[in-house]
Image (cartoon, rainbow, N blue to C red):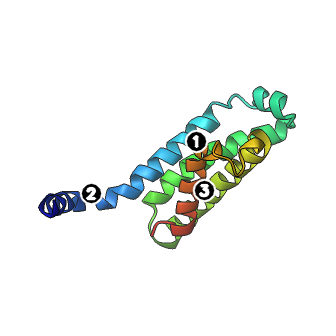
Amino acid sequence: MKSIDNILNAIMRNFYSLTPWLLRLGLGISFIFHGHNKFPLPPQKLIDYFGFSSELASFVAISELSAGILLILGGFLKGHVGNLVTRFASSVIVTVMTFAFTLAHSDWFITPKLFMSEQIFLVIIGLYFFIRGNN
């Protein structure tokens, strides 16, 4: 077993630098799609479902789309600029998801339902990038 593990570690070590990109691309693309699906502006479904103003509903759509784009872009930027772009984008993602849980899924808090949805992983991955930036 140890030799199999050593072989796999030797092979996979070459891919370690790609692992944050799996999370970054998955989360970024997810938010790009979530935001894009709310276009054209203002997104009438958000207005009808939540009673949002057209300005707030448009802000949510633009925020989701922008956060996804910036999260991916932040991975290409080096140094403190990349860290800040990544952290800003992930803070928007965590904020959007926190409001989504509060407004649309308030019955999920502290129940198994929360951990049986993919939405919790959007928050967790967003927190990962907020904490780590590009490090």
Q: Relative to 85, is 24 on the left or the right?
A: left
Amino acid, disc 2 = Phe
Residue at image x 32%, y 61%? 17
Which is closer to the viewer, label 2 or label 3? 2
Residue at image x 60%, y 48%? 120
Q: Nearer the viewer, residue 122 or 57?
A: 122
Neighbours of disc 3 within 10 Å: few (<14), some (14-19), many (20+) = many
Number of numbered discs? 3
Q: Nearer the viewer, residue 16 or 115?
A: 115
Numbered mark located on residue 62 in the image: none
Which badge, 2 or 1, comes first in the chain's sequence?
A: 2
Gap between marks 3 and 1 measured at Cα? 25 Å
> Whole-percent x and y of residue 34?
61, 36
Gap between marks 2 and 3 measured at Cα? 25 Å
Neighbours of disc 2 within 10 Å: few (<14), some (14-19), many (20+) = few
Residue on which disc 2 sits = 15
> Whole-percent x and y of residue 53?
87, 37
Disc 2 is placed on an element classified as helix
Residue on which disc 3 sits = 89
> Whole-percent x and y of residue 116?
58, 42
Q: Nearer the viewer, residue 70 or 134?
A: 134
- In the rendered image, the quadrant that contains the C terminus is bottom left
> Whole-percent x and y of residue 24?
47, 52
Neighbours of disc 1 within 10 Å: few (<14), some (14-19), many (20+) = few
Q: Relative to 34, is 12 on the left or the right?
A: left
Gap between marks 2 and 1 measured at Cα? 29 Å
Amino acid, disc 1 = Met
Numbered mark located on residue 116 in the image: 1
